[in-house]
Image (spheres, helix red, strand yellow):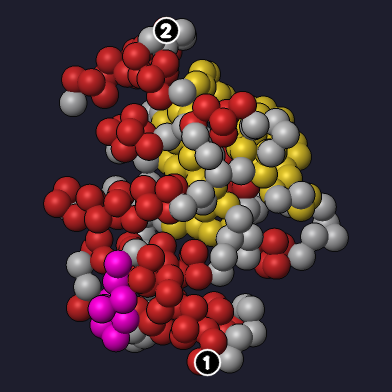
Amino acid sequence: MSRTAARAGQVAEAIVQARGIHKHFGHLHVLRGVDLVVAERELVFVIGPSGSGKSTLLRCLNRLEEPSGGTILVDGIDMLDRRTDINRARQRIGMVFQSFNLYPHMTALGNVSLALRKVQGLDRAAAEARARAALGRVHLDDRAGHYPGQLSGGQQQRVAIARAIALEPRVMLFDEPTSALDPELVGGVLAAMRELREDGMTMVVVSHEMGFAKAAADRVVFMADGLIVEEGPPEALFGNPRQERTRAFIRQIDRH
């Protein structure tokens, strides 16, 4: 699906619908009524200054953080309904974090296959077959027997991506996936993400990789002070932002 088609079909094909999301941490009002709708196969890039609520919004989508108010539907599942089996629902929502969270005593293959066995109940042979396929998708099939300590940071992050996609999620959430990496290791992770996007994976990405946003995103969302200030296709948001708050942010990142 082209970028234009993805945007045109956004309402009819919405796979993520977050409405009126609020989040309080004590007296701190971090999210102030955020609406985010993501179409199937769309790549939405969320940008904004530190403390704007970007990562909190991602974590609310799969209930790693409990929203203080609002509604969240992911692939037709009401994520905030008390009757929802949240562990089952999370299998549809892959998440990749800044830290890799790999088990150091397990090989890449072991890290990727673990959830397939423990969560989805596959036997070892089936789990390892699917894990090898997932490692192949991020070009690490030749590293299946390596332990995290034998891999570069970029390779470890790609193992984390493989672990998430092995569960065959409907949506992938990326929270600053390259911020812990040395600059020369970023490219491999972004290439893996770009291939996922080309394969049609629905993705919501929080990142400072603006070049990737400009090249790969269908839509860019700019957040500040717990609100979505502006959103649109990357060429519009980066090239001709409507809001002064957005313009100030773009000027700042262009200087660095």
Res 244 label = 2
Look at 29% across and 86% down and name the residue there: 145
Q: Amino acid at mark 2?
A: Glu
Left or right relative to 108: residue 1: right
The stretch in magenta equals: 139-149
- SS at mark 1? helix
Q: Is residue 188 highlighted in magenta?
A: no
Look at 42% across and 34% down and name the residue there: 217
Q: Residues within 10 Å of mark 2 (few under 14, many from 20)?
A: few
Look at 42% across and 7% down and name the residue there: 244
Nearest-to-viewer mark from 1 and 2: 1
Left or right relative to 1: residue 253: left
Q: How many numbered dots are placed on residues in this image?
A: 2
Res 146 label = none
Residue 153 appears in the rendering: yes
Residue 121 against residue 153 in the figure, above or below: below
Determine which residue is flagged by label 1.
124
Q: Amino acid at mark 1?
A: Arg
